[in-house]
Image: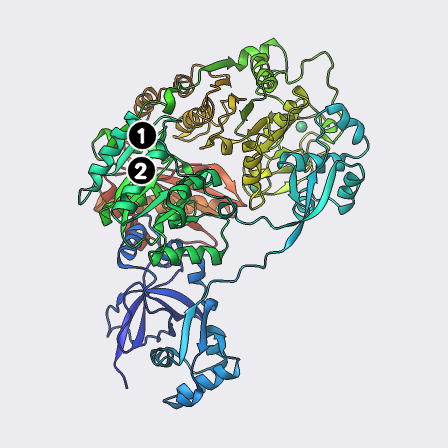
Amino acid sequence: MPAEHRVEVALPVPVFSTFTYSVEDSPPPPGTRVLVPFRRDERIGWVTGPGSGAEDVPRVRPVLDVLEEEPSVPGDMLELARWMGEYYVAPLGIVLRTCLPSALSDSSRDFLTLLGSPDQAGTPRERRLLDALAGAGGTRAVRAFRRALDMGSLWPEIRRLSARGLIRHATLPPRDPPTRSRKVVRVETWLSDLQDRDELFRRSPRQREAYGLLESSGGSMELAHLLDQGGFDRSVVGALEKKGVVAVSEEEVLRDPFRERAPGEPGRHVPTTDQARVLDALKGALSESSPRPALLHGITGSGKTLVYIELLKEVVGRRGGGAIVLVPEISLTPQTVSRFRAEFGDQVAVLHSALSDGERFDAWRQIRRGEKLIAVGARSAVFAPLPRLGAIVVDEEHDGSYKQSESPRYQARDVAVVRAIRTGALCVLGSATPSLESWQNARSGKFQLLSLPHRVGGGALPPVKVVDLKKLWRRGGDPGEGEGRETRQGTRGGSRASGAGKQAGEGILSPELVEGVRDRLRRGEQVILLLNRRGYSNFVQCRECGEVWQCPSCSVSLTFHRTTGRLLCHYCRHEELPPARCIRCGSTELSFKGMGTEQVERVVAETFPGARIARMDVDTTQGKWSHHEILGRVERGEVDILLGTQMIAKGLDFPRVTLVGVVNADVGIHLPDFRASERTFQLLSQVAGRTGRGPLGGEVFVQTSLPDHYAVRAALHHDYEAFAERELGERRNPPYPPHTRLANVVTSSPVLEEAAREAERGAKWIRQAIRRRHRGVEVVGPAPAPIERLHGRWRWHFLLRSASPGTLGALLLAFQEGFNVGGRDVRLVVDRDPVALL
Ligand SMILES: [Zn+2]
Ligand SMILES: [Zn+2]
């Protein structure tokens, strides 16, 4: 009998402890992927070290298979994952699964290939294995193979046979679906005139809807996607074809635009004095053994990307190290990537969400082997396994998308800082509107503060004109915040009674903004319009009794979407037809209130006939590359007005955009969340920064009913520091980050009482623990969560506050170990450093 060893294995299951298994011979090193029996199934896990308590665990099951020779998780990544598990209160196995490409969590991807002959077998078991493999045609998935053979663990045989070169054991990436052509619908005739449209679609509202959907998606869509999204019959498209307004054709499937695009010429930019100063400081930091993280506060258009590129030249080119560049998913455009590709060519691996599992696995392997030295990507690229990490850049470090909303609820910016510090790499956080956390860290000296206070080329930040919506509403139009001006009948594809003595766009677009847009259109320049709310009308309300239509599963009002003609819940995607009458009082007088991007699109189309409009929001960017298709059209000058939600505020750099209009700056400012003002300030500053980036200059119009709100005022004056000062004061009492650390504990259940009871129990447990040994933590609540019901589950929460992250962390670990969640179907979630408390 060979000696038995025990190993600890972390499994991606919601259990905090690791599991003990036995192996024959020497145990594989930590970080190695293994297949183990778990309950009545098999699971992939990672070895974390030698087994603890060897004797007191009487019967341990053996590891079924060791899936790799080299650990997929190198030592420093295993340590980082341990830190994340403890800090964010998540099981280590779940953290590891998050850090690795999903192909590595799929045991069906492991294959055995026969290289020798069954006659070369040494033992009867080896012989059986090789015979079976030959019988299966030479290659077989290990998992199915082991089941078919029923010989228990095959690992000792596999290891011996592969050492002798008789078989190969390899993890293969999933195969991508074959490239094929698809049917695509394209707009042939752009109907810019509202009257044409009414004429053409007089008795066919469905055709009008289909055309509208196509138009707002940038003019083309996959046929299947169009039919699916709008619930249209193929005959609707057929009728549009007959009318000659659309055409259907076979096209090759659009391949990865990051690969298609030829890298541009390397820039011949000479750093400005500001950039050179910042670069000197960063290069100095690179030479230190443990450099301090740097916060690069650079206004929009100040040339942060050039600084990143020059820094990377130093790290990669001169020092032969690797680097990671994190970008919010939405800013990860072919435009951004081509700047890095132009300088670093094939050394760049782009990790974006549209990669297939196979492509992601390939990129990961190339990075791991050191074939690619720069990883550019969204949140999870922070785990790119670069062997000699020299620097991590986090661009737009304030962006909320760096926080993952499911377990592990990590903040990639903070993980980047921790990873850099642990590996001696330099971390650079860049933003025009830094998060207050980073700002505070820079002020306290924890981070090095660097700034780029001027725009490249001496351009000035665009002047911002404020339009008081209260005055606009008084002048005419309906009162209230952009109240939908139509009844249910009017929204059903029928033509609206326009021109009834009213100016088009009245109550939504101010005369100043309309004039500004007209002016740009006349000159052939481009316009960006922002409204951070999707759909047509934000909610439907009974005029008689005030009832507002809510989602049956969430305590959220339903939004009317005109393209689909349905009410939609933005949280759980529940859909229903608009009601014929009020469920409470039976009245048929219903009003559609609160405008969204669909409504603005319509008003803009009416106000500027002939203008080519593209709308970009969640609804028009469902397809894999639709977001890039729309931006491509803007870049090629095929769009005059780009309108959309916050998606259009980030990182776009189009020199012909000379006007930015914020249709309503107040959206979101009153949310019951401590970051509401900060988000408003960031959004306004970022969108304002989209203009004035070329020699044509630029101008910004902000429509608001709160011109005196400090977040709006500071954005109008491009004054980040004034905003930060004021906001830091606002968060002092009661304390909110960055003055304190927070954890949000949320309980939920289909039964309201159970969610409430569990929150009470949890808070009580915590209060006792604080009294006993975790002093320095304060409990706020419990109380119903601001969104009380979501996906049919009632939600309660309480907040934990502490000035000391260590104290808070110790308490959370104790809570996770000592508190048992009770009740049927009750869930408890701990969200550390939450970005939102909704
Ligand atoms: Zn009513
Ligand atoms: Zn819902």
Ligand 2 resides in the quarter of the picture at top right
Who is closer to the viewer here, 167 or 26?
167
Amino acid type of the residue tagged 2 in the rendering: Glu
Sequence-earlier tag: 1 or 2? 1
Q: Which residue is mark 2?
A: 310
- Classify mark 1: helix, strand or loop: loop
Q: Which residue is mark 1?
A: 271
Answer above or below: position of 54 versus 232: below
Q: Quadrant of residue 501?
A: top right
Can residue 326 be seen by looking at this rendering? yes
Answer above or below: position of 465 versus 91: above
- Classify mark 2: helix, strand or loop: helix
Amino acid type of the residue tagged 1 in the rendering: Pro
Q: Position of residue 793 (x, y in %)?
A: 51, 46
Verify CB contact (< 8 Å) between mark 1 and mark 2: yes
Q: Position of residue 611 (x, y in %)?
A: 64, 24
Give the numbered dot on residue 162.
Answer: none
Who is closer to the viewer here, 812 or 582?
812
Left or right of 331: which side holds 33?
A: left
Q: Quadrant of the C terminus?
A: top left
Q: Position of residue 527 (x, y in %)?
A: 55, 23
Who is closer to the viewer here, 494 or 483?
494
Q: Quadrant of residue 802?
A: top left
Answer above or below: position of 252 versus 683: below
User: Farthest residue in the left direction?
Assistant: 289
